[in-house]
Image (tube, rainbow, N blue to C red):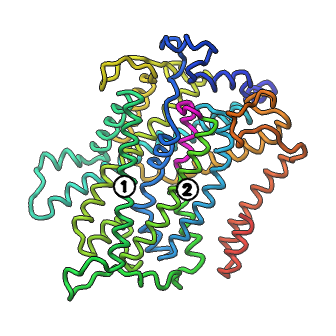
Amino acid sequence: MNSFFQSALQRKPLDLVRKQAHLSDATQHGDSSDHDIPNTREAPLRHMSLFDLVLFGVGCTVGSGVFVLAGVVAHSYAGPSSSISYLLAGFVAALTALPYAELSAAFPMDGSTYSYSYITLGEVFAIMSSLCQTLEYGGSAAAVARSWGEKFVDWVREGHEDGNDIPQWLNSFLDPGYGINPMGGIIAVVCTLVLLCGIQESKMATNVVSSTKILLILFMIVGGFVLASGVVPENDENNPRPASFLNWNPFVPPEFGPVGIVQGSSILFFAFLGYDCICNLSGEAKNPVKDVPRAVLLTLLVDGLVYMMAALSLTAMLPYKQISTISGFPRAFGANGWIWAEKLSGFGEIVTLPLVVLASVQSQTRLLFAMSKDKLVHSLFGKVSFSKSCCSRKEDKIGNISSNIRICGIVVVLLALLVPFQYMDDLISSGALFLFSLTDCCLLTLRYKTRSESFLGNTSDIDDTVSILSIVAVKEHLSLGRSLVLLNVFSLLSGLCFAYIPISTVKCSLAITFA
């Protein structure tokens, strides 16, 4: 029994950590001539800059927080003060993101929480983390693909509301019944094929779609403010537009109050999920020790600014009681007579949503790649291929984990095609919260266990390329047990205060204090 527990809690050796952290380096063997022979490498070359990482992170996170949740929170929880809800949710997300930033600098390798858990806590925690990450990446990819399929079918049907019926064969294909979602399966196939085209091609597709998404959201924000300002003349003076900055009054609706702001932030917290995917791609970053932590923080900064401005813009276009909880911005543009903007924003969501599927499948493959190097899954998931790209005649010198992508792609396609996800959302969210808690514990354990040595090497080995966020020295008398107990006790007290104290002012004050 003792040997079982010792095996379950066995940590990854530091020598192996250092070796795996340099697998993707061009000069990983200390001899620049080795990387000229692609087949000698055990991992694809590092190729992502800080700009690429930020676009990847923004593409993973920004989406439903604007297209769906902005309308839900403004209508049902906080009104115009939903912008404060975004600010509060972003602050909480930043507290969770800082441990990711620090650990990603200390361990510049694939796997994110899986790798951090294996190094600091033990193998059993790494396996638990990998299961939750599979839910977050692979499960989310299939769920978003099905959601996209349903949105696509609704969009096609809306285009035929003018009396032109959809052909019977097309209607049967789009919605055959029995829980089958053909368009969800098709978009999952498309994303898998993009990843199989090559790392450079998938990176280019991610950057283009992510930039398009940001431009679309900026258009929606600016359009809302333009309508509210009254710069554009009315088309019908007898039917004035509802857009006005007066819709912000009262900014905190009395029926919601401070409690509504906090309740809205608890929902909007999940609009910031996805930044941990950046840490999962540390093996692809050119300078992971510096760029990955910066990308995590910059992604949250961009997300927070975009979300707050989107909430203000939406609540300026319509009184909060009239905002749609299903399609906030498109319906708001339609209510103000901008039908073309309504169509554009609805179509833009259809075009940009598949980026989440692409990024989630990519993150899942990098997780399995990291696990294969630790021999926790089959070595096929760690096989690197250097075949010619389908979009170029040149030989691929970076490498691609093609077998891994094929297997993950097939599983995601089948899930998106055949499996309904009515009850998966809460399970995925719970897994994400567990990962955040586990990452915090990893950081506390790391600070407690390493008093004078960094996991990157002895302090004498640290040079100027090491980020200030990496672990070099920690306080000698930090009590890990006390920190973990206080962390969980305060979280429990915060939840109890918010749930059972009837006086709203006291409730929010105590909940924020303990949180």
Secondary structure category for the residue under label 1: helix
Please report the residue visible at 57 percent of the width from the left and 42 percent of the height from the top: 132
Q: Is residue 13 visible?
A: yes
Q: Which residues are magenta?
A: 274-287
Percent position (x, y) of residue 455? 75, 31
- Asked if residue 72 is positioned above or below residue 157 in the image, the reply reads below
Numbered disc total:
2
Of residue 428 and residue 104, the one placed in the foreground of this image is 104
Of residue 431 and residue 78, the one placed in the foreground of this image is 78
- What amino acid type is highlighted by mark number 1? Leu
Seen as rendered, the residue at the extreme right is 477
Q: Quadrant of the C terminus?
A: bottom right
- Asked if residue 294 is positioned above or below residue 109 in the image, the reply reads below
Q: Reading the chain from its start, which is encountered first: label 1 or label 2?
A: 1
Percent position (x, y) of residue 112? 60, 38
Q: Is residue 128 visible?
A: no
Q: Which residue is mark 1?
A: 215
Left or right: 360 in relation to 329: right
Secondary structure category for the residue under label 2: helix
Please report the residue visible at 73 percent of the width from the left and 43 percent of the height from the top: 443
**Distance from Cα at disc 1 to Cα at disc 2:** 17 Å
- What amino acid type is highlighted by mark number 2? Leu
Of residue 444 and residue 184, the one placed in the foreground of this image is 444
Percent position (x, y) of residue 159? 17, 59
Of residue 367 and residue 456, the one placed in the foreground of this image is 456
Left or right: 100 in relation to 175: right
Q: Residues within 10 Å of mark 1 (few under 14, many from 20)?
A: few
Q: Which residue is mark 2?
A: 301
